[in-house]
Amino acid sequence: MGAAMRRIHVGNALSAFGLGFTIPYLYVYVAQVRGLGSMTAGLVLAVFAVAALIVLPFAGRAIVRRGPLPVLMTALVTASLGALSLGLSAHAPTVLSSAALLGAGQAVMQPALATMIVECSSAETRSRAFAFQFFLQNLGLGVGGLIGGHLVDASRPATFTLLFAIEAAMFLVLVAVMATVRMPRAPRVAGVPGEPAGSGWRQLLDNRAMVQLCVLGFVLFFACYGQFESGLAAYGVEAAGISTSALGTALAANTLVIVVAQFAVLKFVERRKRSRVIAAVGLIWAVAWAVAGYAGLGGGSRTMATAAFISTYALFGLGEAMLSPTVAPLVADLAPAGLAGQYNSAFALVKQLALAIGPAVGGPMGASLHAPYVVTFLLFSLGITVLAVRLGRRLTEVQNQPSLVRSRVVTQGGAPAGRVVAAEA
């Protein structure tokens, strides 16, 4: 791992730490500490998603034209201003505008950092780089949430101001760290005379393999991540009678499985076709939903229901550990030279859409329509397997299983354009 990659991973860990440091306590801060009510708190959470959906299409173009590092620095400064302003805001308009700044900055960090990983890695090292990124992200989220929870006190608004001030300072420290990164020279697409401004998006939409991967990605995030803290949590409490402490244990089990299994799973994944690994994840998650069905509908004891519910989250964690070295590198390998930023931003946009729609659909279903909820998402998980198998038919051998050609170095920034065309033929 070179110096640039080490600094990029520090950036991933710190950005995830900031997310875990403040986001879990945002609702309490707005609704109770600032006394703005649940409606405003809900709007703040919605603003995060809306801000991401607005800025990500432009972020991809900026990364392609300017490079990921300048875009990342801008996002960090924006997020720092948003965090500091949020900690000082006491009225709804300033809280909402501050949340928009913080949400936009955090949304752009993801594709910028992912593109930096692509440009500092080869096809042979990319899976491990993204696996390490996912490991650090989960570690950062967990540690951030743990420390943040011990700092805040709902009866003392100053503790929340301190929380957001620390987050703002952390983003500025990250600016200083990223300023020392020396990126390798990578292709830039600055535009061709007479070329329409939206040609990058049109080229992406013409790439059938990438479109199929985006559809698959939406289902992945909708059926898993979009349910963790909304529909599945509501289902566990209402149908299975899970206590809040048991819910916390289930979330901890999910993180623990990822941290423990990530690198053991990586050795297995690197030797398999990516499409088959994703298909296997769909089957594992289908089993997870079946176990969740037993927890809430099986009629067993409270102890058995709790154990089954925790096992559901653990199975989701196993699937996540298999996906981290698979999906993100595949996005990069499908991108023509110089367009990795555009492709990463497009996939991040799909993720944000799934995370916005998932809770809205799953929350009410999980709380009241228990059996339909489990059956629906069990079928979505099986759909992941079907979509993964279909995607595999669109991929070249290199894209589907890079280990077959270890001696071949794929052009930095993604697979050569010729291979993408071949994948679409």
Image: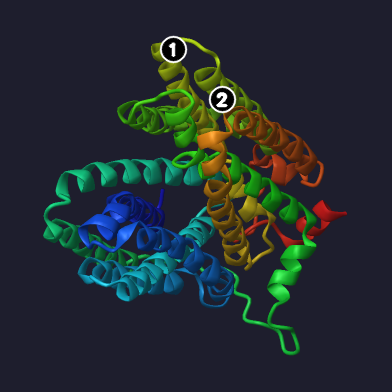
Q: Earlier in the sequence, mark 1 or mark 2?
A: 2
Compared across the picture, whether 359 is left or right of 87 comes to right
Residue 288 circle label: 2
Q: Residue at x 49, y 32 (%)?
A: 235
Q: Quadrant of the C terminus?
A: bottom right
Q: Residue at x 42, y 28 (%)?
A: 257
Q: Of 138 and 72, which appears nearest the observer?
A: 138
- Amino acid under label 1? Met
Indicate the secondary structure of the residue bearing disc 2: helix
- Amino acid under label 2? Ala
Q: Quadrant of residue 369?
A: top right
Compared across the picture, whether 214 is left or right of 99 comes to right
Q: Of 193 and 159, which appears nearest the observer?
A: 159
Q: CA distance from mark 1 to mark 2?
A: 15 Å
Q: Quadrant of residue 56?
A: bottom right
Q: How is the image coloured?
A: rainbow
Q: Indicate the position of residue 306 as horizontal and vertical percent values.
A: 41, 19
Q: Indicate the position of residue 1 as horizontal and vertical percent values.
A: 41, 48
Q: Indicate the position of residue 92 as horizontal and vertical percent values.
A: 32, 71
Indicate the secondary structure of the residue bearing disc 1: helix
Q: State whether residue 168 is above or below residue 257.
A: below
Query: Can residue 1 be seen in this snapshot?
Result: yes
Q: Indicate the position of residue 133 as horizontal and vertical percent values.
A: 43, 47
Q: Give the mark toward the camera: 1 or 2.
A: 1
Q: Residue furthest bottom?
A: 193
Residue 304 circle label: 1
Query: Can residue 324 be seen in this snapshot?
Result: no
Residue 183 circle label: none
Q: Of 184 and 162, which appears nearest the observer?
A: 162
